[in-house]
Amino acid sequence: MELLCPAGNLASLKTALNAGADAVYLGLKNDTNARSFAGLNFTPKKLQEAAQYTKQQGKKIFLTINTFPKPGEEKRWYEAVDIAANTGIDALIVADLSLLDYAHSHYPHLPLHLSVQASATNLGALTLYKKEFNIERAVLPRVLSMKQVRDLSKVTPVDLEVFAFGSLCIMAEGRCHLSSYVTGQSPNTGGSCSPAKHVRWQEEGHDRLTRLNEVLIDKSGINEQMGYPVVCKGRYITEQNSVPSHLLESPTSLNTLSLLPELAKANVVSLKIEGRQRSPAYVEQVTTVWRRAIDTYLHDPENYQTQSEWDRALAKVSEGQTTTLGAYERTWQ
Amino acid sequence: MIEKKTMKASLGPIQYCWPKEKINEFYTQVAASNIPLVYLGETICSRRRELKFADYMDLAHMLKASGKEVVISTLALLEAPSEFTELKKQVENGEFTIEANDIGAVQAAKEKHLPFICGPTINNYNLASLKLLHQWGMQRFVMPVELSKHWLNHVIAEEKPTFEIEVLGHGFLPLALSARCFTARQQGLVKDKCQTICIENPKGILVQTQESQSLLRLNGIQTQSAACIDLTSEIASMDKMGIDYFRVSPSGIKCIEKADNLFDGASSVQYQNADLSCNGYWHQEAGFNHL
């Protein structure tokens, strides 16, 4: 089982590899990936440096090109594929049909991973991507229960990668328009969910008001721990319930340490850690814990147990300092 | 003289869980209307079983007999193997084209060399992707809701498409899909024992911010916009652009009249709409904006 860690910059990449990541994923410094934030990501030159360092360590490096090419601007996305192919990247993480087609026809030997943004949750979808573009692996959206992952693993024509830890996206990825509905910026086209330029915090007496494009997403105590403001994790009211509550989800992170044996038994090949936008300190903390957990499991699968110190360490870097099994657990759904 | 096709009305699938009698009543009225294209089927949740496959096929035959083109709409989020099995049954119905709302449905149709329509939850963001889908059998696509007039103009400008174009012009916007059932959760129920509680919310549950701004609508595992998209004032320009169908997404029986009278211009009965309306996406802005 591969431990796949996020690298928002070269410092995070080195930290991840030194802390025990088997592979890292990263994006170029433009809107060809869904973490297109200022100060993050790699220029082609930095990408080369990153690839060299990763190779020296005997580890793998994947380039994320998971937004959808805009009409008339497709060139930028095709160039990203060309850059990856010429930099010795080990695999591309892609969502768009036309881009998969481009990569597959121009660089048939460059392995393709289907991005979570392609939202492939079933055998039919995986079959199509395998047959048409010979994808090697698919990243499963965070909407399947553990049983559904297991069922899919028995019939899938490709390797499966799952999200193991990090900020919890509760919608079928790649098909969520909540951000663009409120801000006009979509992860699919603009490269980010809930962009920082639309976020505004306002103090009012003992309350902190969180606004996204002036829409009141949340009202909290000044000292309350808050996650990054996204539409799906706000506090709202309904006709039947005038007490504000997290109607969709509260700020929380996904943590699947306790599912590790089940994920291994389902032949999941890679465990993905979310968080290219997070600091090197986060990457170090999370990678260290997960390395220990995977090694503990592999050493003695039968007696694997999650250790409370691991959970405590991960909770510290989690949104709202709490974690959940998310959709893997049926009762969450 | 250059032949000019004119834009027609279409009626999207019912997004909500309505009782069987209401659905039957709805389509009886649709049959009596002049709406030429009707989409039919459960697209949100496989736990909604008011109508079964055979019931939908009966309705489809009734509508076809009254001169409609009928399309069978399929689930937007396919997770359980049982859902994929049901999908195959829909694809192989032997008579009606399907609306694929998940790439899995595209594969099921393609495998059988059957034509299909791409619904709004298939990610189509450029002409090259649309062309691939067309090669695989796509006859028409419904533009993803977050895209704009500008986007569409650009796609059409590159090349005159050989497939048809449909745009959601009226109704609540499908914004997101989750594994979690928000309606059940709101009622303190778990999804596996939900008692099909969605049936009590024929237009979903309206969600407002703490400043009473209407924002979203919870409809089972789907999140919709609180505001209703309304592009009726754009009809003339949409027609000129070459859009083939203007989709009305049902929110109640009254929308049949809306779809039926779309092109009557000023003489039409003004549809009284108490809901907020929006058109931001069409103008390349935040979806909830109204310009």
Image: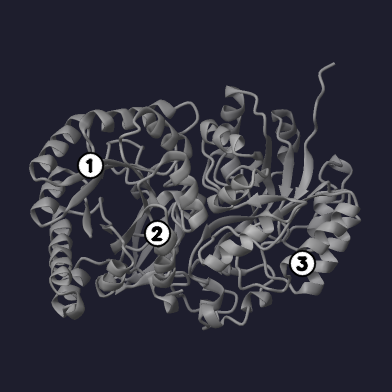
Vertical position of residue B61 compared to residue A289: above or below? above
Using the image, name the chain to which the residue with label 3 belongs. Answer: B
**Which kind of residue does numbered mark 3 sit on?**
Ala
Instruction: Please give the name of the residue rendered at 72% of the width and 70% of the height, measured from the top-left corner.
Output: B52
Classed neighbour count for the residue bearing mark 2: other residues with Cα under 10 Å, few (<14), some (14–19), many (≥20): many
Image location (x, y in percent) of residue B273: 74, 58
The answer to whether B263 appears left or right of A304 in the picture is right
Left or right: A318, with B40 as reference point: left
Circle 1: element type: loop
Above or below A306: residue A183 = above
Residue closer to the observer: B35 or B114: B114
| Mark earlier in primary sequence (2, 1) | 1
- Give left or right: position of B260 versus B90: right
Q: What residue is disc 2 on? A: A230
| Percent coordinates x, y for residue B245 in the rendering | 74, 41
Q: Quadrant of residue A82?
A: top left
Location of residue B211 with respect to A89 vertically, above or below: below
The 10 Å Cα crowd at callout 1, few under 14, some 14 to 19, many 20 or more, is few
* Quadrant of the rendering where the N terminus of chain A is positioned: bottom left
Helix, strand or loop status at disc 3: helix
Q: Which residue is mark 1?
A: A39
Q: Residues within 10 Å of mark 3 (few under 14, many from 20)?
A: few
Q: Residue at x 36, y 37 (%)?
A: A32
